[in-house]
């Protein structure tokens, strides 16, 4: 009886996916414990975040892909409206208009777009699945461009690029012709000087800093210099858990959130990094497997896009901490402290599980 | 159905192809990350390891305790005490004025603290941190500690402060320390002491504090400290303790100094007392003095202006750098020159009409009608000018200057503080160097006559005068005056004594010196010093003097009451006692005080009474009535 209830309860949970995520979470908690020795309350807060994220995942896993598909257009339209509202009435914080004050709470509508964008594009491609023509890709391009431009002009280039990436993955997986992909890439590279001219000063500085962090050692370069030192001084086996000097003497800024990888890398070294990369790789492989075997076009596209977005976060974060990508506000998936990011990640994982478990249901 | 199925198959194939490509890209990009990690953590590991250590470990200098300065009896003249200061690191603070405004809400910051801080910012460019407030109370320390997080770059530091417990007493020879400025940095660089001065913020600026800087400073220690990103120490890894500076123990008796300073009252002047058998300085007075404590942490502009613009010039060390004509105190030295050079015998007498005619000029004696028959003894006891007018003329300027050199006149004594004036011992050669135009360079015989009574071009420091008196008291040996008796290493207890340094011997027979000593005893017994030394329980030798500040026209008598205060004559007195075996020799100058017998001799009496009898007089020495025959 209990066994039956348990089976029903865990029916939609994908074992491998959950197992890998749980392992990464454990590593994350260890690192967070080391990084937040000064604010131990973060540990218990993160435990709460994780518990909440599990609930989100479980709920998402129960929702069949068809229901998600129905939700796509309204969610997308809501996101667009909120972005317009931000542009008109948003609060300015740190020189950017990103937040919308709803009276009781403030929200960042660009976060909604991270989910709404791939849903909407997958919905669109699924609808015209039978015969996708160039025109459909143009429409999809427009659906992608509108919110991205709205976010970019807040300005929040990092989020805009991530949203654009999640949309692009859907378009790519839907079968956009290679000629167009290559043509766009060439055009993109060609338009770089133009893009440079519209960038804000702080954005340019971040990019320049990447090439020469010592040019501004106390300002924008400080993050990169200190996190690179942390990674490099970790060596092959690391300094040992709780023994990272860069982390514990406060040389690493934002060491429990965006720069937590510096703490991990300092204390666990190259071996730790390899283990983490393998875990991410396993999770991505499982995600892509689910995508490849998903029953409907929509489910495939969504599963693929979610997985690749997950990869993007991991890659951009580690690239930024180790000094090969500019500093953008991207957390390290399943490791960084923060409830919102964690809930979003497990929402994605739940959706992947839903694609996996509802496979037979749809086919029969 | 079949085509649709086939389409589905084809579509799935294409989708899986794309997924495969995506997977390959993922692998590729992770490969790049792995390469980057390998580069940082294996190839560049040593470099980043060093960087992390540099971040973590900071070498903090530990400033040694500065040596103490005590008088001969162990009374402390300069010491250290620990206090908290609130310091701002200008490099780490953007707008210092705004930060100071904020700080004012936490601890009291007076306008004078602000002006002083601004001055320090300009003077001490590149300093790590500068004090905005010193001597914080415990409550202020606690209040700041609570608010510390609000003020990055501002911190409380426990510092040793220099304190001069005697205040104005002895301020000129003790000197003071102040914050290191560019000139001091150059000195440190030249002396190759830069390593030892890491962390040191103060340095001796004047007096003994300056002269004995190397002894007093000590050896700087160091501490390896683990610091956090804010530069704050987390824990100590290793420590090399500093070695304290050496203590200075003086030959000087600060209570004697105090008696002497009090004896001056509000008068300006100087007094130097030395031990004639060693050259050790017993008292070294320059009045008015100043409070050296004001300078320790940067003097505030108001006090500085007051000291610097005062017409009394309290910052000038008159005993060391003030030069005065010796007036009649020059006569005993002239008399010894006459004996030694064979120009006079003690009993050879002149008849004094009250003046001396030379080259159409009439050089007057103060006593109208003259002193009658005057031999050498009487010439000193009554201070007869006419006797010395003639003597000077007989000796000639080159003989005078030649002999006076032996006493140390016109030459820096080499005392152990900086800033000594050489004075002027006039001679033909000196005049040629001193003046440009040929008619000025020529020496006139009439000028020799003025020099004979200690006027004219003569100008000596009170220190030189005291050294010269000391050589008469010692029976002919000239000692280099010095303030420090020994330097003490407080760790080993080792003492480095300064041996008395005889720099010369007077070319005179002992019986010739004895003639002069007997005459000087006569001065205090029956002569111009007799009133001041009435009832003394010891036998002393002395000589009064009055130095003209402005030239008096021919045939005009000097009238003190008609002359403005700053143009009044300086009063001088030289003395040694006990006469039979002198323990102390001194010279006193009281500026613009008129006759030496009246203003200067009582100060000398107070000093001798204290030194020989232990009599303490805590009030200004009362002037005595004029003596008949004083000039």
Image (cartoon, rainbow, N blue to C red):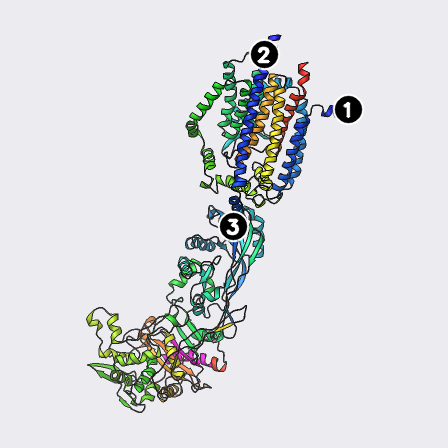
Q: Is residue B630 visible?
A: no
Instruction: Report the mark closest to the observer, 3 or 1.
Output: 1
Q: Is residue B600 magenta?
A: yes
Horizontal side, residue B311 vs residue B68: left or right: left
Magenta residue span = B582-610
Residue that carries the numbered disc 1 in the rendered image: A4
Q: Nearer the viewer, residue B213 or B497?
A: B497
Residue that carries the numbered disc 3 in the rendered image: B154
Q: Residues within 10 Å of mark 2 (few under 14, many from 20)?
A: few
Helix, strand, or loop for circle 3?
strand
Give the image location of residue B163, x and y in percent: 50, 64
- Measure the C-alpha gap from mark 2 to mark 1: 40 Å
Instruction: Report the mark closest to the observer, 2 or 1.
Output: 2
Q: Residue at x 61, y 11 (%)?
A: B5
Give the image location of residue B134, x and y in percent: 51, 57
Q: Is residue B393 magenta?
A: no
Q: Quadrant of residue B124?
A: bottom left
Helix, strand, or loop for circle 1?
helix
From this view, report whether residue A222 is shown above or below residue B485. Answer: above
Q: Label 1 is found on which chain of the structure?
A: A
Horizontal side, residue A302 vs residue B500: left or right: right
Q: Is residue A137 visible?
A: yes
Dot label at residue A202 = none
Residue that carries the numbered disc 2 in the rendered image: B7
Q: Residue furthest bottom?
A: B347
Q: Label 2 is found on which chain of the structure?
A: B
- Residues at marks 3 and 2 on the same chain: yes
């Amino acid at each position: 009886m209990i066994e039956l209830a348990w089976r029903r309860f865990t029916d939609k949970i994908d074992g491998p996916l959950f197992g890998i995520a749980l392992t990464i979470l454990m590593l994350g908690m260890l690192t967070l414990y080391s990084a937040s020795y000064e604010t131990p309350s973060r540990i218990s807060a993160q435990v709460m975040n994780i518990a909440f994220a599990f609930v989100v995942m479980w709920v998402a896993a129960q929702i069949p892909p068809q229901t998600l598909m129905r939700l796509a257009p309204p969610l997308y339209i809501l996101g667009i409206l909120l972005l317009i509202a931000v542009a008109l009435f948003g609060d300015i914080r740190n020189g950017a208009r990103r937040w919308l004050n709803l009276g009781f709470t403030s929200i960042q509508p660009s976060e909604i777009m991270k989910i709404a964008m791939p849903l909407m594009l997958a919905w669109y491609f699924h609808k015209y699945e039978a015969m996708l023509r160039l025109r459909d890709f143009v429409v999809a391009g427009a659906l992608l461009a509108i919110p991205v431009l709205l976010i970019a002009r807040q300005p929040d280039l990092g989020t805009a690029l991530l949203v654009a990436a999640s949309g692009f993955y859907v378009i790519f997986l839907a079968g956009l012709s290679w000629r167009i992909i290559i043509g766009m890439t060439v055009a993109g590279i060609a338009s770089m000087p133009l893009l440079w001219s519209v960038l804000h000063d702080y954005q340019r500085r971040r990019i320049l800093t990447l090439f020469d962090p010592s040019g501004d050692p106390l300002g924008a370069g400080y993050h990169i210099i200190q996190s690179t030192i942390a990674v490099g001084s970790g060596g092959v086996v690391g300094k040992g858990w709780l023994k990272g000097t860069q982390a514990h003497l406060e040389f690493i800024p934002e060491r429990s959130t965006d720069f937590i990888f510096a703490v991990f890398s300092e204390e666990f070294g190259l071996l730790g990094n390899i283990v983490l990369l393998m875990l991410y790789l396993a999770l991505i492989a499982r995600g892509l497997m689910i995508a490849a075997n998903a029953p409907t076009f929509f489910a495939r596209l969504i599963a693929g896009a979610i997985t690749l977005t997950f990869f993007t976060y991991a890659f951009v974060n580690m690239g930024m901490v180790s000094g090969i990508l500019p500093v953008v506000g991207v957390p390290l998936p399943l490791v960084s402290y923060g409830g919102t990011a964690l809930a979003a990640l497990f929402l994605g994982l739940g959706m992947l599980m839903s694609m996996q478990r509802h496979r037979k249901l749809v086919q029969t | 159905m079949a085509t649709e199925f086939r389409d589905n198959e084809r579509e799935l194939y294409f989708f899986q192809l794309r997924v495969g490509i995506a997977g390959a890209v993922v692998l590729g990009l992770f490969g790049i990350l792995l390469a980057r990690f390998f580069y940082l953590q294996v190839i560049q590991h040593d470099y980043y390891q060093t960087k992390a250590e540099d971040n973590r470990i900071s070498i903090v200098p530990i400033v040694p305790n500065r040596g103490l300065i005590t008088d001969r009896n162990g009374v402390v003249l300069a010491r250290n005490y620990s206090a908290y200061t609130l310091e701002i690191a200008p490099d780490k603070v953007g707008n210092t004025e705004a930060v100071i405004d904020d700080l004012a809400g936490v601890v009291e910051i007076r306008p004078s603290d602000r002006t002083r801080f601004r001055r320090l910012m300009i003077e001490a460019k590149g300093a790590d941190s500068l004090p905005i407030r010193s001597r914080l109370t415990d409550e202020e320390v606690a209040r700041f500690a609570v608010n510390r997080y609000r003020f990055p770059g501002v911190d409380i530091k426990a510092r040793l402060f220099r304190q001069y417990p005697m205040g104005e007493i002895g301020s000129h020879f003790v000197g003071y320390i102040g914050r290191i400025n560019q000139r001091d940095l150059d000195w440190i660089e030249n002396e190759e002491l830069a390593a030892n001065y890491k962390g040191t913020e103060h340095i001796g600026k004047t007096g003994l504090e300056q002269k004995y800087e190397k002894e007093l400073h000590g050896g700087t220690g160091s501490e390896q400290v683990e610091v956090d990103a804010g530069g704050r120490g987390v824990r100590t890894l290793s420590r090399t303790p500093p070695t304290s500076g050496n203590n200075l123990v003086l030959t000087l008796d600060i209570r004697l100094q105090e008696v002497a300073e009090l004896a001056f009252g509000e008068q300006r002047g100087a007094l130097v007392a030395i031990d004639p058998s060693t050259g050790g300085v017993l008292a070294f007075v320059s009045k008015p003095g100043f409070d050296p404590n004001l300078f320790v942490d940067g003097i505030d502009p108001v006090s500085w202006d007051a000291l610097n613009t005062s017409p009394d010039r309290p910052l000038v060390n008159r005993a060391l750098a003030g030069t005065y004509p010796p007036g009649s105190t020059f006569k005993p030295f002239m008399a010894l020159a006459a004996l030694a050079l064979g120009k006079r015998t003690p009993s050879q007498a002149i008849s004094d009409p009250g003046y001396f005619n030379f080259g159409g000029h009439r050089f007057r004696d103060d006593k109208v009608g003259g002193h009658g028959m005057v031999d050498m003894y009487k010439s000193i006891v009554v201070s007869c000018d006419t006797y010395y007018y003639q003597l000077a003329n007989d000796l000639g300027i080159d003989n005078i200057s030649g002999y006076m050199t032996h006493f140390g006149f016109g030459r820096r004594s080499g005392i152990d503080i900086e800033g000594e004036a050489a004075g002027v011992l006039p001679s033909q050669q000196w005049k040629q160097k001193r003046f440009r135009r040929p008619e000025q360079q020529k020496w006139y015989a009439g000028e020799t006559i003025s020099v004979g009574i200690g006027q004219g071009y003569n100008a000596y420091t009170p220190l030189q005068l005291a050294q010269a008196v000391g050589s008469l008291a010692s029976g002919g040996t000239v000692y280099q005056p010095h303030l420090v008796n020994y330097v003490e290493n407080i760790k080993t207890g080792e003492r480095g004594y300064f041996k008395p340094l005889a720099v010369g011997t007077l070319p005179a027979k002992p019986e010739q010196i004895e003639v002069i000593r007997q005459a000087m005893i006569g001065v205090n017994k029956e002569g111009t010093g007799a009133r001041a030394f009435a009832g003394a329980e010891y036998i002393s030798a002395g000589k009064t003097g009055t130095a003209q500040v402005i030239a008096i026209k021919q045939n005009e008598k000097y009238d003190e009451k008609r002359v403005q205060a700053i143009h009044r004559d300086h009063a001088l007195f030289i003395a040694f006692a006990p006469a039979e075996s002198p323990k102390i020799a001194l010279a006193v100058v009281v500026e613009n005080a008129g006759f030496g017998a009246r203003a200067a001799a009582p100060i000398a009496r107070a000093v001798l009474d204290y030194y020989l009898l232990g009599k303490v007089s805590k009030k200004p020495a009362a002037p005595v009535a004029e003596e008949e025959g004083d000039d």
